[in-house]
Image (cartoon, coloured by chain):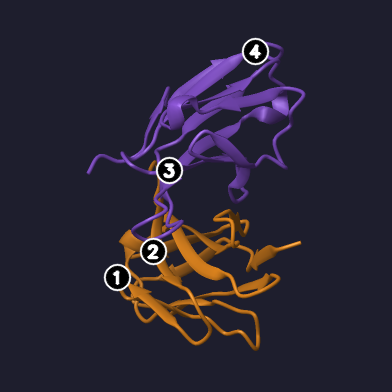
Chain colours: A purple, B orange
Amino acid sequence: EAGVAQSPRYKIIEKRQSVAFWCNPISGHATLYWYQQILGQGPKLLIQFQNNGVVDDSQLPKDRFSAERLKGVDSTLKIQPAKLEDSAVYLCASSSLRRVKYEQYFGPGTRLTVT
Amino acid sequence: GDSVTQMEGPVTLSEEAFLTINCTYTATGYPSLFWYVQYPGEGLQLLLKATKADDKGSNKGFEATYRKETTSFHLEKGSVQVSDSAVYFCALRTNTGKLIFGQGTTLQVKP
């Protein structure tokens, strides 16, 4: 079974630029999560999708971050415009509603550096 | 709101030493509890889990017991190896599936 795929793995941008990250979850997983992991901290949930719908986006800075999950499969997280404090690793995870409900599998992450 | 607190790191041990990393949580209801590990340059991996009070999760020689009375889920290993050097995260899962993580504890094992 293929794992969660993310791209790019690394991205360096200047502040006020925009950036997008892509995630392909494990096949058949209905729930998809985006977490932000700032250096030295634990991951923090930004947004959770179940199929196409948003379950939780309470910690997503909506003035600059947006996310979508088209057709309930792949997802894109966008930052526009980026700030220095957005430098972090962005982790995507997915889970099934059937087998072991909510057991999350993480992708390798995208490391974003904002200069 | 729900939260997880881990002991501060880094923790430095000699090979074959006993390891304890403390974790306590605050939550409404009875969340599932997890330990995740992040090896250098790699992604987050599930190490072990417990879904109800008094459950013991175990994997690769690591153990943790879900203690409802002390709201704790301490990670232990009897004899650490250099290959156990990593960052360890304690986490709880809410009833909507969201994971709430502690800040992480870095373990360095010296030969």
On-image quarter of the C terminus of chain A = top right
Q: Name the chain letter of the residue that bears numbered label 1.
A: B
Q: CA distance from mark 2 to mark 1?
A: 8 Å
Give the amino acid type for the residue marked by disc 2 in the picture. Leu
Element at badge 1? Answer: loop
Is label 4 in contact with label 3 (beta carbons under 8 Å)?
Answer: no
Q: Position of residue A12 (x, y in %)?
A: 54, 17
Residue A37 appears in the rendering: no
**In the image, which disc is placed on residue A14?**
4
* Badge 4: chain ID: A
Q: Are marks 1 and 4 on the same chain?
A: no
Determine contact: label 2, label 1, CB under 8 Å.
yes
Q: Nearer the viewer, residue A73 or A45?
A: A73
Q: Which residue is mark 1?
A: B60
Residue count near mark 2 (Cα–Cα under 10 Å), binned few <14, some 14–19, many ≥20: some
Instruction: Give the mark nearest the N terminus, 4 or 3.
Output: 4
Front disc: 2 or 3: 3
- Seen at 39% across and 51% down, the residue is A96
Tell me how far mark 1 sits from mark 4, CA to CA: 42 Å
